[in-house]
Amino acid sequence: MDIEKTGAVVIGAGVVGLARARELAGRGIETIIVERHPAFGQETSSLNSEVIHAGLYYPTGTLKAQFCVEGNRQLHAYCAERGIAHKRCGKLVAAASEAQRAYLTTLQQQAIANGVDDTRLLDKDEALRLEPELHCVAALLSPSTGIVDSHALMFSLLGEAENQGAVFSPNTTVRSIEVVEGASTLRLTVDSGGKSMCLDAERVVNAAGLSAVALARTLTVYPDGLLLTAYLAKGNYYALAGRTPFSHLIYPVPESGGLGVHLTLDLGGQARFGPDVEWIEHIDYDVDPRRAERFYAEIRKYWPSLPDASLQPAYSGIRPKITGPGEPNADFMIQGPDAHGISGLVNLLGIESPGLTACLVIARQVVELI
Ligand SMILES: Cc1cc2nc3c(=O)[nH]c(=O)nc-3n(C[C@H](O)[C@H](O)[C@H](O)COP(=O)(O)OP(=O)(O)OC[C@H]3O[C@@H](n4cnc5c(N)ncnc54)[C@H](O)[C@@H]3O)c2cc1C
């Protein structure tokens, strides 16, 4: 079998893998980005809400909280410097009933503890002045929440990685990772262009998203205690036919496994709703039209005048979960040499939301590890 050697391999050309490849290449490390699809960003990184989160919800001290708050600042700046379409449109978390009002205060305290100091509690009249069609008893305004063109972001990250010498290898599927030569080299077995070959590298970043856990499990020398189980939680989206009356993102009080069926806007001003949470066994992106009924019910809690027959199935994305239904949400799991003892290897597991917001920060942290 052919063997090719390089300094680093990044598995997966999603937003996190590309950010990492840019960081590695920027430090003069010969880097190959391998991707099983013909193009970058064909999975979760293009099937999400494209929200630059502020970092309100995550428990203080978690990687999600730290990376999201810093990631928000860095991503806004990165996009502004490079002319990548993005907008600081702000978001309102709406309490639909008196019973939900207390949650807003708790959420604001959580945000402050995380270092987000610009949120504002609004009474009903203040909220309605911003969004006249919103139904709420009170709302929390997060001015630094924004939206980004995720494709343009990935295009920029890949371009910068390539300009610094990284090589993009599409249509290349990694089958396994093994440790060779007295632990100084990592060997990937890959299928590329219909043939099997090996890629030897000093450093490997497993940023394979939905397949990251399965790839980590191909390592025969991995500590048992670090082997996780992968779960898939699909999030379905419906598009609004016609114009939206909203100019902010609108979020309900969260539901288990996700942030609730929220309203996000794309950069063209079109509204979409979602994602909900549907636990699935196998990857399947179909949006079941029968879920619409639940969407109407959820959305009308904060937008009662949502017209009948205005929702159309749009798309879905799948969260790469490492805890299952009914279990508490896990933090990002970054397993580097300090955890597993294998020099040069980082496995990125459970990189669900806010992975898009956090991509630049995760990239820097990971490169420091190897
Ligand atoms: C419904 C939903 C909504 C979300 N909304 C937001 C949001 O609004 N804001 C936010 O910050 N985050 C959001 N996220 C999270 C965010 O989208 C992800 O954290 C981020 O896209 C993860 O990027 P990634 O590069 O790790 O993974 P991916 O985008 O999944 O990329 C992994 C890549 O690896 C490739 N790959 C897999 N296996 C192999 C293999 N064996 N060989 C070669 N290549 C392989 C895949 O083809 C893929 O291209 C959302 C996620 C979901 C599911």
Image (cartoon, rainbow, N blue to C red):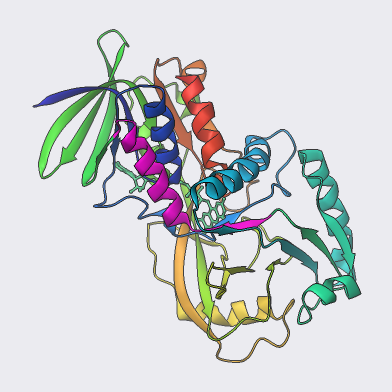
Q: Is residue 5 above or below residue 117?
A: above
Residue found 25% across the figure and 22% down from its top: 6
Relative placement, left or right, of 344 versus 104 is left
Q: Residue furthest bottom?
A: 308
The one nearer the camera, 44 or 127, is: 127
List x then y, in percent, for residue 323. 56, 44
Q: Residue furthest top?
A: 182
Residue found 24% across the figure and 52% down from its top: 38
Number of callouts in the render?
Answer: 0
The one nearer the camera, 22 or 369, is: 22
For residue 23: magenta?
Answer: no
Relative placement, left or right, of 96 versus 292 is right
List x then y, in percent, for residue 322. 52, 42
Most common SS among magenta residues: helix
Residue found 48% across the figure and 37% down from its top: 349
Residue 163 visible within the image: yes
List x then y, in percent, for residue 151. 42, 56
Name which quarter of the figure residue 306 lies in: bottom right
Residue found 81% across the figure and 45% down from its top: 117
For residue 151: magenta?
Answer: yes
Residue 208 visible within the image: no
Query: What segment is highlighted magenta in the picture?
Result: 145-166
Q: Quadrant of the N terminus?
A: top left
List x then y, in percent, for residue 357. 57, 47
The one nearer the camera, 151 or 224, is: 151
Name which quarter of the figure residue 209 lies in: top left
Q: Is residue 253 above or below residue 360?
A: below
Q: Quadrant of the C terminus?
A: top left
